[in-house]
Image (tube, helix red, strand yellow):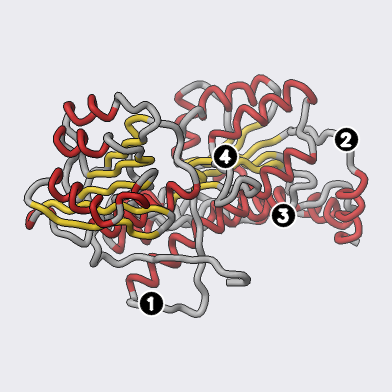
Amino acid sequence: FATQHFAQRQASMTEITPIHRALISVSDKTGLLPFCQKLHEQGIELISTGGTHKALTAANIPAIDVSDLTGFPEMMDGRVKTLHPKVHGGLLAIRENPEHEAAMLAHDIRAIDLLVVNLYPFEATLARGGDFDTCIENIDIGGPAMIRAAAKNHADVAVIVEPADYDALLNELALHKGTTLALRKKLAQKAYARTGSYDAAISNWMADQIGEENPSFRAFGGTLAEVMRYGENPHQSAAFYKGPVSRPGVATAVQIQGKPLSFNNLNDTDAAYELVAEFDPAKGAAVAIIKHANPCGVATGKTLQAAYIAALRCDPTSAFGGIVALNQPLDAESATEIVKIFTEVIIAPGASDAAKAIIATKKNLRLLITDALPNPRAKGLNVRSLAGG
């Protein structure tokens, strides 16, 4: 009956689902107080946990502590606080399903119509170089369980996993006094992607910890950094996603000037910077020029200028419109040489003010500055997609 009821609602539901109760549990409190204040002004009852409850209480926003809801205190250093039928029953119960409604009545479970959860900052902890025990304690348990429950029951429940979606939900409340199924589906998709990306970061970290290079299951995840104008060809779409571990390169670079990078720019710039990083800057300057994923020239020299001139001589025709990567900070002398022909991108571990001024005369030339060179011997994943794998 439950499956049939859910399918019928998916197929025919056009009504707005109101929000009477919301459970809020967030580690990232960006925008939390104004968001919750507006929920409160709409007459929505708020339930919250730990630090979230303290923040709301301090701001005089009424909220029920989850411990008062469940009848159990937070325990085991906060590892157990939301794993309870009054939470998961409230999220998973199918509205208007007689069996579910009877169970709710029998066990004093009230529906939860909105879940707002962002997870313990595992990825940020990993990026900061947290030790093993610290990383373990930043693995969220209750959060993913609640997120998946609310997303599964998106016919009745809205789920938010990042502050960026607060406005979308508030706009729907203002327009409809509730949420539309279209928004709940969109939020559910993001919710599953978030827990998937989160678990991917954890599983890949653990594989590295135990030295497992080829685990039976391998998960991949990332966070949207940029939607691109097109893919490898103009008729294709593309997007750039960042992973949880920061390796110096395109993903960490600061773009000083120029229009956004294209799909092909990203691929070529990554290849060029990884190539030039093979050359120790302490032993001399090195320059790589890449075009369409192929090296047009690679050279070393006593100065960057000399290395660039030598690299350009390898194939000056193919180098036109290419990517230039340097293993030392860009200086004025090398910048002067580079701007003599059309170049798409320059990437380097720094740039002098004089070099930046020279590059600025070419408004379409992208200049990317990283904080370091990537370590060619560092552990990491290099993933390529094929049809079906």
Q: Residues within 10 Å of mark 4 (few under 14, many from 20)?
A: some
Residue corresponding to mark 1: 213
Q: Is residue 194 visible?
A: yes
Q: CA distance from mark 4 to mark 1?
A: 35 Å
Q: Quadrant of the C terminus?
A: bottom right
Q: Earlier in the sequence, mark 4 or mark 3?
A: 3
Question: In the rendered view, does 226 fall on the left or right side of 314?
Answer: right
Q: Nearer the viewer, mark 4 or mark 3?
A: 4
Task: Give the image quarter of residue 168.
Answer: top right
Q: Residue at x 59, y 53 (%)?
A: 193
Residue 229: mark in rendering:
4
Give percent across and percent down for residue 298. 24, 58
Q: Please state, as top left, top right, bottom left or bottom right, where the N terminus lies in the image.
A: bottom right
- Give the residue at x 29% y 25%: 360
Q: CA distance from mark 1 to mark 3?
A: 33 Å
- Tell me the distance, in whole angstroms, between the alpha carbons under discs 2 and 4: 36 Å
Q: Earlier in the sequence, mark 1 or mark 3?
A: 3
Residue tagged 3: 152
Circle 4: element type? loop
* Residue 58: % across, % down: 45, 25
Please state which amino acid type lies under the numbered disc 3: Lys
Q: Residue 305: percent from the left, percent from the top?
A: 14, 43
Residue position for label 2: 15
Q: Could you say whether the residue bearing mark 1 is in a helix, strand or loop?
A: loop
Against 67, residue 29 (above or below) is above
Question: Marks 4 and 1: CB-CB under 8 Å?
Answer: no
